[in-house]
Structures are given as C-alpha cells and as structure tokens.
Amino acid sequence: MSYPPAETKTIMQKLIERSHIYAQNHAPTMTFSEGKALPEGSMPKVNVIISCCDPRCLPEEFFMLEKGFEYSIVRNAGGRANEALRSIICMDTLLGVQSVIVVHHTDCGLTHLTDTSIRASLLAKDPSLESSISNMEFGEITDIPAAVLEDVAFLRDSPLIDDSIPIYGCVYDIGSGLVSEVV
C-alpha cells in the first residue's frame, strides 16, 4: 500500500491557509446585533438569490455582487425553491426579504439525472435504503425554463412568503455568461 507524501496537505489545510491570506485584507461587516441596535428601518432588507450548488454557477460573479447585507445566496442541487424555503423564511425573520430571485443554469447536473437514476445509485451502494428512499424526489429537471416557472410558482403560492415580496426567475447560460429573465 502506498501513502501520499507527508508534505501533502489536505483540502482543509489548503482552505485554512487561504483564509489566513484572505484575513490580511478582511474588513469586518456589521454584526446582526449591531444591525438590530440601529434605528427602525435602517437595516436594508435582503435580496435572496436561490442558485444551484454547481461550482460553475456563481451568482456573486455573474451578477457582480459585493459583500454585505444586500444579497443572500442560497445554494442547493438544481437551485430548487422547495429546499430553499426554510432559508428564505429565516432571512425574512432576521432581516426582512426585499425580493427573491430563482436562478437555474444551462447544463445543470439535474438535467442529466432522474429521481430514478439517483435512487438506483443509492440502492447500489446500500440496498437497505430502499424503504427510506423509495418516495424521495431529488428535483430532476427535464426543461430548465419550465423548472424556473415551477419554482417561482411554488414560492408565490407559499403562505409562508408575503405576497408583497416580488419573486423573479432567470436562467444563467454557462457558455455565454449571460442571464435571461424567464419570469
């Protein structure tokens, strides 16, 4: 059996080293406690962006976002709204939500998978999982614009999100870098 050389760093060690470099120029942002101490209405509401966890889909980059309280990014496989709902509710309770933007992207991994194929993969690893995964849905996407419309409708129909909060949907093209509004 061969082992990696002793000087090989783990991914965690590399990330911690990067954080030390980042910290040299880090400017702390306001804490939530400091924000709560501000006069009523001084703290801006946040725009929540729901996006895929695909490392090629980075709203901070293609929307050219700056650090601060203006935007909160919620990521999950496929950028699906049902999995982001809890985060939206928490952000609305903490800061208030100004808008929600659902971002899906071209060549999403969930356009290459189905709920059935994911279940089969899990069962191949551990057949004892069958009863716990037989009805699970993983958010497969067969039509990207239709999935955006579905997610926007889910959020607009949710009694947990105030009707006054605008909800938008768009698609990021990983080839061109452009975003197009769907709804």
Image (spheres, rainbow, N blue to C red):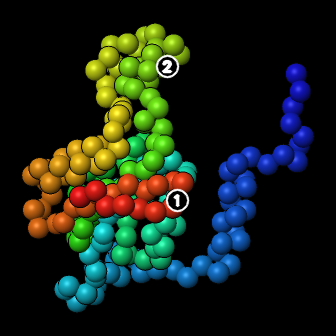
**Position of 152 relative to 22 (above/below):** above
Which of the numbered marks, if any, corresponds to residue 148? none
Q: Is residue 51 left or right of residue 3?
A: left
How many marks do you count on the picture? 2
Image point (45%, 47%), residue name? 106
**Nearest to the observer: residue 45 or residue 7:** 45
The answer to whether one can see residue 19 in this image is yes
**Position of 124 relative to 173 (above/below):** above
Q: Which residue is mark 2?
A: 121
In the rendered image, the quadrant that contains the C terminus is bottom left
**Position of 97 relative to 3 (above/below):** below
Q: CA distance from mark 1 to mark 2?
A: 32 Å
The answer to whether one can see residue 90 in this image is no
Q: Which residue is mark 1?
A: 176
Image point (72%, 53%), residue name? 13
In the rendered image, the quadrant that contains the N terminus is top right
Q: Position of residue 132 (x, y in %)?
A: 34, 19
Secondary structure state at the residue bearing disc 2? helix
How packed is label 1: few (under 14 Cα within 10 Å), some, or many (20 or more)?
A: few
Q: Position of residue 170 (x, y in %)?
A: 33, 57
Identity, as a three-letter code, of the amino acid under mark 2: Ser
